Image: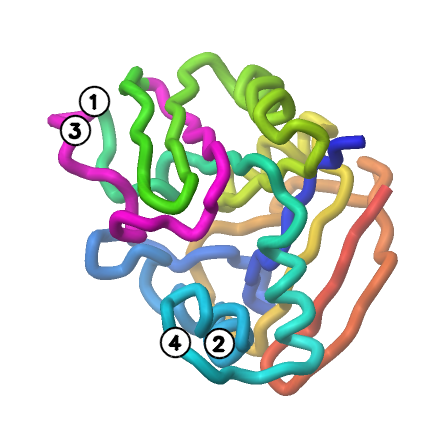
Amino acid sequence: MTRVRVAGFSISLDGFGAGAEQSLENPLGKRGRELHEWIFGTRMFRAMIGESGGSDGIDQAYAHRSMDGFGAFILGRNMFGPIRGPWPDNSWKGWWGDNPPYHAPTFVLTHYPRDPIEMEGGTTFFFVTNGIEEALEQAKLAANGRDVKIGGGVETVRQYLLAGLIDELHFALSPVVLGQGEAMFAGIDLPALGYRVTEHQATEHATHIVLSR
C-alpha cells in the first residue's frame, strides 16, 4: 500500500527548515546549508554526486532511507528553483543539472502551467496547478504501489501535514540555530493531528526523529 512520507528533512534546533532569502546563490536560504551537514559525508550522498567513499552508520542509514522505496515525489515550486511568478521561458530545469536525484515522476506545485520536462535518469517533472490533493492523486498513480515522498520545502510539508495527508515524517534535527527562516511547526499541533515519536537516534551531526500515526 502506498504511503505518503517525508524523509531526510533537516531542521534547526529552533524549528526552521530553511534559511531566509532563498536565491540562486543560496538555494537553501542563508545558512540553510548548515542544516544538512549530517548527510554530506554519507556514502549515499557521495554516490549521488558521483563520488566514492563516505561514511556508514546511523546517518548513512537514514540518508539511504530518505530516497529509497519512492515511486514519485512532490515538490513545492521553491524546491524546483528560485523563479517566482509566471515562467519567463523554459530554460530553468531545476537545481540539479541534467540528471536530478529523483529518478521517478516528480510533481511540482505551481500556480503557473508548464509542459512536463523529461530529464536524464528517469526523472520527469510535471507541473500541477490545481492544488496539493490533485498532485498527490497523480503522484500515487505514478508511484504504482511504491511510496510518495513529500520532498519539501517547508510550506509544502506544512500544507500536507495540516491536510492530514502524511503518514510518516523523518526529521534530522541539526545542532544549529538559525534565528529566522521558514518555521516548520509554527501553529501546528502534531499530537492533535495524531503523530507521535516512533523512532529516535542521535549522531554527532544530527538527532534523527521519526513521527508516525
Q: Which residues are magenta?
A: 87-111
Residue 51: assigned label: 4
Residue 74: assigned label: none
Q: Amino acid at mark 2?
A: Glu
Residue 39 image position (x, y, % from top left): 52, 72
Q: Earlier in the sequence, mark 4 or mark 3?
A: 4
Identify the residue under disc 2.
37
View extreme (front): residue? 121
Q: Residue at x 38, y 31 (%)?
A: 125
Residue 29 image position (x, y, % from top left): 34, 58
Residue 204 image position (x, y, % from top left): 63, 86
Q: CA distance from mark 4 to mark 1?
A: 36 Å
Q: Earlier in the sequence, mark 2 or mark 1?
A: 2
Q: Amino acid at mark 4?
A: Glu
Q: CA distance from mark 2 to mark 4?
A: 17 Å
Identify the residue under disc 1.
86
Which of the two discs, 3 and 1, sits closer to the camera?
Answer: 3
The vertical placement of 117 against 210, above or below, is: above
What colouring method underlies this structural image? rainbow
Q: CA distance from mark 3 to mark 1?
A: 11 Å
Q: Nearer the viewer, residue 191 or 173?
A: 173
Q: Nearer the viewer, residue 59 or 133?
A: 59
Identify the residue under disc 3.
90
Q: Amino acid at mark 1?
A: Pro
Residue 54 colored in magenta in the image:
no
Q: On the rendered image, what quadrant is the N terminus found in?
A: top right
